[in-house]
Image: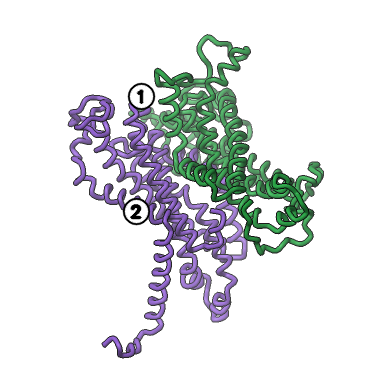
Amino acid sequence: MTSQSISTTPHVDGLVGPGFPHRRSRLAGRFSRRFVLTQFAGSAFALMFVIVVNFFLFRVINPHPERTLGRGKARTAEDLEEIRRRLGLDESMWIQFGKYLKQVFTGDFGVSFQYSKPVPELIAERVWPTLLLVLPATVLSIWLGSRLGSRQAWKHGGRFDRSTSVFATVMYSMPEWWLGLLLFMVFAANPVFGVFPIGGLHSPGVEPMSVEGVADTIWHLVLPTTTLTVTYLAEYSMIMRSSMLDVMGEDYLLTGRAKGLSDRQVLHRHALPNARLPLTTLIALNLAFTVGGAITIETVFSIPGLGLLTSEAMRIPDLPLLQALFLVFSAAVVVANMVANFIYALQDPRVKV
Amino acid sequence: MTTAPAPPRRSSATALRWKLRREAWGRTWAKFRANRAGMVGLAVLLVFAVIAVFAPLLADSHELRVSAASGPILAPPSRKYPLGTDDNGRSVLTLLIFGARVPLLVGLMATVISMVIGTIVGMASGISDGWAGTVLFRFTEWFIVIPFLPLALVLATLLGGSLLSIIVVIGITGWPATALVIRAQTFSVRERPFMERARVLGAGPWHLMSKHVFPNVLPLVFANTTLTVAGSVLAETTLSFLGFGDPTAVSWGTMLNAAFGTGAVSLGAWWALLPPGICVIVVVLAFTMAGQALEDIVNPRLKEGR
């Protein structure tokens, strides 16, 4: 047991047992109306801002989308005018904005150029593969990352800590898609080690809803999920380690030891619950990066989700689809962020709710 | 001569200020030198900078042209081609040397944009109490939440794929973290006595920002710059991997894009995948290590825990 330098950080008076946040009631009724309202209003405001920015991105930065769209096909002035009329670009900015708002609130984003399908239908089809990829990777990386980080900190300076810290720093500097390419080359494309499929979500001829089909889908998801998990794990472990080191200097751990608790008890009851708090905030912030990971990893492993749809849409460029996708991604992150704020408030009794 | 007392300087205030600044930089450098990780990072960066600047001396730029490529296609490393050849028969080593230029240039230029926006927004939101500060802060927070890659992709699609537009895209998406750090620092500077003194003497917000807040947040800006370059280099690589950027310009990202797109990775041509990827990681790691060393020096409170 390494003896910790005792921190001089004063206790916040009136805390309800800093070591026992999980002892408090977790009923949703804990939230005051004010807290709930602030959270919802903040998210609604952020969403509205996303909607406005989305309009301006596509209309102001690029005032002549018909030129981008007509690339190759529309050459004459009449062709361009025809596209302008079809997109409603010949009307005033305010009318366009009004129509755009109506589109957003009715969910009618027009028809994808590339697929000639309504955009919402396309997005609804493609959302499941992305969730199948991102959710397990997020849960796994948080779980493994916090375990790794707390173990590093608990025996900090030891051999385990030093070697895994180097690993985490390197992973943190690695583009996740490069790791994906590496795993792809070794475990999918290689004739000897390539035991995993080279891409997609289902093998041809396998019914996705059967038992065999589920196993097949999981088989397809092993490499992409591993890639994302390893990349995100690095960051979570780094934050958990530093948060744990902060907590380890606190007086209440000394108190815990003084009253005869075992090392394990001190760790699990007093240190971990508090060290986990900053992680919640980070998870919320990280969701924005998770979306980026979905785009690159789905591209590498050809998983037919929203990420692959995005990278296809920007090559065309399929502007109606791209506009809707940006909105979906941003809205998802804003909402997830709000959920994380509620969870944080539940975990930390010091937050006034 | 040396034993004689130093003659009084004429512009003593300015001279004193410069002397203090020089000493402060000297102290920072001394601390930085003692930080091993920081020095390793700095050394690695110098090596890559030299390679990028003197690329035409290290390799023949004619070999970059696809039409002039004479080597076999996707050949493994040999004596003539130490890192093998790509799908066009070009030497991977030559591509790697010239490929250092774009990520470093884009990384540095984009960081300049991010730093200017981040510092101004951060100081402004930190110094003003009223609604302007709140609005700027909310805007920064909003920008942090918005997923970076979709935003960058949308911007890059709309602005086109030139080198300049990639710089702008990465620059205007990379500032919010800096703005938050600078805002926090501005808050702590704001409460110091010399600020009150300046305010009492009638200093306006512009004077306060430029003469009092800015010099005090500057060290933090520098530490943050180094960390931001790491992120910008990663962003450039990711955007070029996804097919953005000038297709004729050679960069590590476009090399990886080609390795993936033309099937070199599927064929197991590791020499097309490993060298550019490892270079990216090493450069990003070096910027991160140097940046963290600087951050430890200018903001010692963060030191424990690393």
Q: Residue at x 63, y 56 (%)?
A: A3
Query: In the figure, A108 relative to A279: above or below?
Result: above
Colour used to depict chain A in the structure image: green
Q: Residue at x 40, y 21 (%)?
A: A190
- Residue B190: image x %, image y %? 57, 70
SS for dot 1: loop
Looking at numbered disc 1 in the image, what kind of residue is underneath it?
A: Gly
Q: Which mark is residue B268?
A: 1
Left or right: residue B18 versus residue A337 is: left
Q: Is residue B163 visible?
A: yes
**In the figure, the purple chain has which letter?**
B
Q: Which mark is residue B43?
A: 2
Looking at numbered disc 2 in the image, what kind of residue is underneath it?
A: Ala
Left or right: residue A324 versus residue A74 is: right
Q: Which mark is residue B138?
A: none
The one nearer the camera, B240 or B49, is B49
